[in-house]
Image: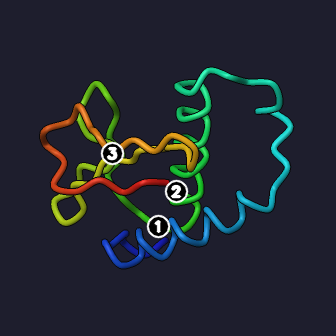
């Protein structure tokens, strides 16, 4: 059984994930210009990365927050270096973590 996800392990995993993804030539995204499609793809990939390593409560846009666990309460946002965005429609998130 995987350990429980904590804020510290979430931050560490996000950095590791970003380091891996920044070196990976993701052919599934070549030619994709729809930012929402890219964000959804990367968000799902990150959640899978977390799922393989940790136990956590998985949320969704329908639930209002991506990681709703009592000690996590974090929304995942995927943004571009060229056009960063930090707004979140989810009021329940105590924090946002940009991936």
Looking at the image, do the residues carrying marks 3 and 1 touch, with CB atoms under 8 Å apart? no
- What is the distance, in whole Å, between disc 3 and disc 1 at their CAs? 26 Å
* Residue at the extreme front of the image, as rendered: 82
Q: Position of residue 57 (x, y in %)?
A: 32, 52
Looking at the image, do the residues carrying marks 1 and 2 touch, with CB atoms under 8 Å apart? yes
Q: Position of residue 26 (x, y in %)?
A: 81, 44
**Which residue is tagged 2?**
51
* Crowding at mark 1 (Cα within 10 Å: few <14, some 14-19, many 20+): some
Mark whose residue sits in front, 3 or 2:
3
* Crowding at mark 2 (Cα within 10 Å: few <14, some 14-19, many 20+): some
**Which residue is tagged 1?**
54
- What is the distance, in whole Å, between disc 3 and disc 2 at their CAs? 25 Å
Q: Is residue 8 above or below residue 72?
A: below
Secondary structure category for the residue under label 1: loop
Q: Residue at x 23, y 31 (%)?
A: 89
Q: Residue at x 41, y 68 (%)?
A: 10
Judging depth in this view, the residue of 10 and 69 nearest the camera is: 10
Q: Can you see residue 1?
A: no
Secondary structure category for the residue under label 3: loop
Q: Residue at x 33, y 43 (%)?
A: 66
Question: Is residue 34 toward the left or the right of residue 32 in the image?
Answer: left
**Which residue is tagged 3?**
86
Q: Can you see residue 99?
A: yes
Secondary structure category for the residue under label 2: helix
Looking at the image, do the residues carrying marks 3 and 2 touch, with CB atoms under 8 Å apart? no
């Amino acid at each position: 059984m995987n350990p429980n996800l904590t804020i510290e392990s979430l931050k560490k995993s996000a950095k590791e994930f970003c380091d891996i993804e920044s070196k990976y030539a993701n052919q599934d995204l070549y030619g994709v210009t729809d930012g929402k499609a890219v964000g959804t793809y990367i968000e799902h990939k990150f959640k899978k990365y977390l799922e393989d390593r940790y136990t956590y409560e998985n949320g969704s846009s329908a639930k209002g927050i991506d990681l709703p666990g009592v000690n996590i309460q974090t929304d995942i946002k995927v943004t571009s270096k060229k056009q960063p965005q930090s707004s979140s429609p989810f009021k329940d998130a105590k924090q946002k973590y940009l991936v």
